[in-house]
Amino acid sequence: MGKEKKLLKREECDKRYQWHIEDLYASDELWEKDYEALEKEIPELSSYEGRLKEGYDTFLSYERKKEELLKKFEAVYVYANQKYHEDTGNATYQKLCARAQNLSLMVNNATVFEEPELLDIGEETIGTWMEASEDMQVYRRYFYELFRQQKHVLSKEMEAVLADVSDMSGDISNIFSMFNNADVRFPDIKGKDGQDIAVTHGRYTSLMESRDREMRKDAFTSLYSQYGQFKNTLAGTYSANLKSTAFFAKMRKYDSGLAMALDGNEIPISVYTELIDTVHDHMDLMHRYVRLRKKALGVEELHMYDLYAPMVDEVEMKIPFEEAKEIVAKGLAPLGEDYIKVLTEGMNGGWIDVYENEGKRSGAYSWGAYGTHPFVLMNYQDTLNHVFTLAHEMGHSMHSYYSDKNQPYPYAGYCIFVAEVASTCNEALLMEYLLGHTEDKKEKAYLINYFLEQFKGTLYRQTMFAEFEKITHEMAQNKEPLTAEVLNDIYYKLNEQYFGEDIVIDPEIALEWARIPHFYTPFYVYQYATGYSAAIAISRKILSGDEKTKEGYFKFLSGGSSRNPIELLKLCGVDMTTKEPVESALKLFGELLDQMEELL
């Protein structure tokens, strides 16, 4: 089905491979009914403004009303967006999406008074509410978080000023986004047949993965030629972003932008610094990987544009979706019967929209609304990569399933620090299963290569990004100049440190900082590396037969945001405040290198 020359229209596709969106709403008419009810009822929340101080009965009445409306709003919002994602050219669902977004603004406006009002009431008074009412106990963590960060909340007048400044500072990210997505154009390159090939953001990755080395080099040069032309403008934009972060950190009484960014999820700064230090301690493994890549590609000089070229020949593994489901279930068997039962029900029971159709949103994701099962969007092709995508997205879905099932609405969601753990753990378990069930050297090399690329791209590369952010934010806080030349020099030296002496650090790579959108969401990317490390550590413990870890893992999956992410991961025997999880992951990286060196 995935091999159709011409994409089918949505209505022409086999409904057995489409998600059961009717589990949210059986019809647009029922959606409309809830939408109209929400339009009338959301503004009613504002009637509680100024009244929360009346006592816990009023607070409970407000919270129950709010949660009832938010659950309904989630269903309305998710349905509209997922119907739109089925066919982005469908004007009906484009309008539904826009209307759902308007409801989101209404919710924000109707509830904006809540936290300032509760802070005014004070921790002592709310403490007496907690003692007086059993029904208040569910909000214990909510109030803990609210008052924990109270010292960083300013007066009502100052908060209003910061909100206006925040709106302006948000333009910095928008300016970069407009430049990067709309304005910058890269020179075409020539293909082997002499035809022009357009270099775009979307195509750049596939061009870097080409077996044609000249094409890789030309694409690399094309891309960075434009960032080089605008390096001073981009340095000014990034520097303004750094200054903005330093300003807000100072105003909110944090020691640094890093402290401010990590405080939201109660992450100790040591987690960030230990990640960088531990990766530094094992830099020899990345240097070994680089030497292995140089040998595998058979080049006299390895260049930066060679880092994504295939190290091994493509293995033809045509895996239809029905077979993929069986492989994933077998690979995740170490998680136990209950997990596999729910997983199988999900894969067969309308959670997944499997195949591409005309107008369908690209990529893959897991999403849903509280009170119904999760949904997974895929564009499945019969490849090994898509089998891993299935395992990955079902990991997210199973995390959501267990959290929704076991947590009350306020704590069912989970933060980004732990969001990639369940999905990556699934991939690691599946990889070990596949490696253990093949004797074919070529296939084994292909699988190990896939795993090695994840370590390179997620653990090392994201840590390098995190280190660049740490250096540059500290310089901005200390009011040191951050010109294009300074930023280029920092980034170039980091590449030298991370990739070692067996690769030519091409001068163009010094400009890579200028094209990374995540740098405009400060101190975000480190979470990819920590989440990956935690997932590998958990998977290793589970595969070793550690029942305590497996039991703790299900508590973690069921935990939502009922604890901070560090405490949730400790349930699995993984303490991210120590070096152990990252070292465990890097130990596996070393073992994979050993195996690959024998195969090549």
Image (cartoon, rainbow, N blue to C red):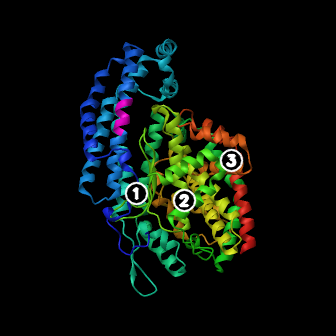
Q: Residues within 10 Å of mark 1 (few under 14, many from 20)?
A: many
Q: Is residue 491 above or below residue 138?
A: below
Mark drawn on residue 325: 2
* Left or right of 326, for residue 84: left
Q: Is residue 398 above or below residue 330?
A: above
Q: Which of the two labelled residues, at mark 3 and mark 1, occupies the earlier sequence position?
A: 1
Q: Which secondary structure is most common in the magenta stretch?
A: helix
In the structure shown, which secondary structural element does the residue marked by tag 1 occupy?
loop
Q: Which of the two labelled residues, at mark 2 and mark 3, occupies the earlier sequence position?
A: 2
* Left or right of 180, for residue 310: right
Mark drawn on residue 9: none
Q: CA distance from mark 2 to mark 3?
A: 30 Å
Q: CA distance from mark 2 to mark 1?
A: 15 Å
Q: CA distance from mark 3 to mark 1?
A: 38 Å
Q: Which residue is mark 3?
A: 581
Identity of the residue drawn at 63% across and 40% down:
569
User: 442 or 465: nearer the eye?
Assistant: 442
**Residue 231 on image: x %, y %:** 43, 63
Q: Residues within 10 Å of mark 2 (few under 14, many from 20)?
A: some
| Amino acid type at image mark 3 | Pro
**Residue 288 on image: x %, y %:** 71, 66
Q: Which residue is mark 1?
A: 18
Q: Which residues are magenta?
A: 67-73
Q: Does residue 192 belong to the magenta stretch? A: no
